Structures are given as structure tokens and as C-alpha cells.
Image: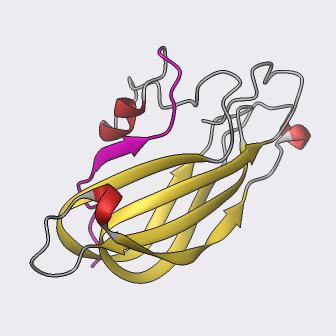
């Protein structure tokens, strides 16, 4: 039976100081989540590591209700055997992408949970956010 894997954020291209990327390391009703910096340049990148190479069978992403990425690209990576396992030195394989709804139908009230079935092995996961959906509530063009 698949288990929830422990991971650690190891890279973030930008963050809003009030919603730092380190929030992604904790999972509770009290965490505020990550948001990109205000008026950031896209694409944005988040990098995660596991303690050892893992088999990824499913990835779940929960989006903010109005600071919504238009497209997320998913990658899995690892470093060659014998080399230091460092995020920015490993090789990544593109797994695909997913698109998120602009959420206008819910009047930007509902968050979107995406579950993606995978069959990938690696030590790192990279999520690349390509642009955000523009709406009247997302004044600073952020994703979260």
C-alpha cells in the first residue's frame, strides 16, 4: 500500500515573506502555505528532496483559491551513483504537466486538489510553475 513520503523543500525561486516556501515542509491545518513573491518572474520553481531514492506512485498538489498557477510541469531527478546528492547538480526527467482551473466558476472560493498518478523513481522532485491565472483578487500576479 502506498505511503505518504517525507520530503524536504530544498529549492525555491521566490517566496512571499508572509508565505515562505518552508511552509511546504509542514502539513497541518495551521500552516499558511507557500506563495510566490509579488510580481515575480515566471517560471517559478520548487524543489523537494527525499532522504533516499523513492518510487513515486502519486503526487498531490493543492492550489490556492485565487493565486493559481496556470500550468505545473513535473520532473523527477537523481544524481549518478557515487556523486553527492545535490538538487542543483542532478539530472531531471520530465514526467509531464498538469493544468489548473482558473476557478472563476466558484468565484475564487474553492481550492483545487490535483492528484497525478506516477510511476517514477528518484531522489528529487521539481515543480515548475508557468504563469498564474489573472483575476481581480490576484493583484500581485502570484501563484500559491
Which segment did they paint magenta?
Answer: 1-17
How are the colours assigned in the image? secondary structure
| Residue lying at 53% horizontally and 53% vertically, measured from the top left | 61
| Residue lying at 80% horizontally and 19% vertically, measured from the top left | 139
Where does the N terminus fall, quadrant-wise? bottom left
Figure label count? 0
Image position of 93 with respect to 60: above or below: below
Image position of 52 with respect to 63: above or below: below
Outermost residue, left direction?
82
Image position of 138 with respect to 99: above or below: above
Q: Position of residue 141 (x, y in %)?
A: 76, 28
The reply to whether the magenta stretch includes residue 56 is no
Q: Position of residue 118 (x, y in %)?
A: 47, 79
Image position of 97 with respect to 27: above or below: below
Q: Position of residue 26 (x, y in %)?
A: 30, 36
| Residue lying at 46% horizontally and 48% vertically, measured from the top left | 46
Amino acid at each position: 500500500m502506498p505511503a505518504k513520503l517525507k520530503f524536504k523543500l530544498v529549492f525555491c525561486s521566490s517566496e512571499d515573506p508572509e508565505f515562505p516556501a518552508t511552509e511546504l515542509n509542514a502539513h497541518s491545518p495551521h500552516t499558511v502555505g507557500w506563495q510566490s513573491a509579488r510580481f515575480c518572474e515566471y517560471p517559478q520553481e520548487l524543489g523537494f528532496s527525499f532522504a533516499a531514492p523513492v518510487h513515486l506512485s502519486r503526487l498531490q498538489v493543492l492550489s490556492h483559491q485565487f493565486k493559481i498557477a496556470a500550468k505545473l510541469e513535473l520532473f523527477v531527478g537523481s544524481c549518478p551513483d557515487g556523486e553527492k546528492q545535490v538538487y542543483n547538480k542532478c539530472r531531471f526527467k520530465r514526467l509531464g504537466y498538469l493544468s489548473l482551473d482558473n476557478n472563476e466558476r466558484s468565484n475564487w472560493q474553492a481550492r483545487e486538489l490535483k492528484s497525478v498518478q506516477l510511476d517514477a523513481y528518484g531522489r528529487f522532485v521539481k515543480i515548475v510553475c508557468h504563469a498564474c491565472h489573472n483575476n481581480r483578487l490576484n493583484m500581485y500576479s502570484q501563484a500559491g
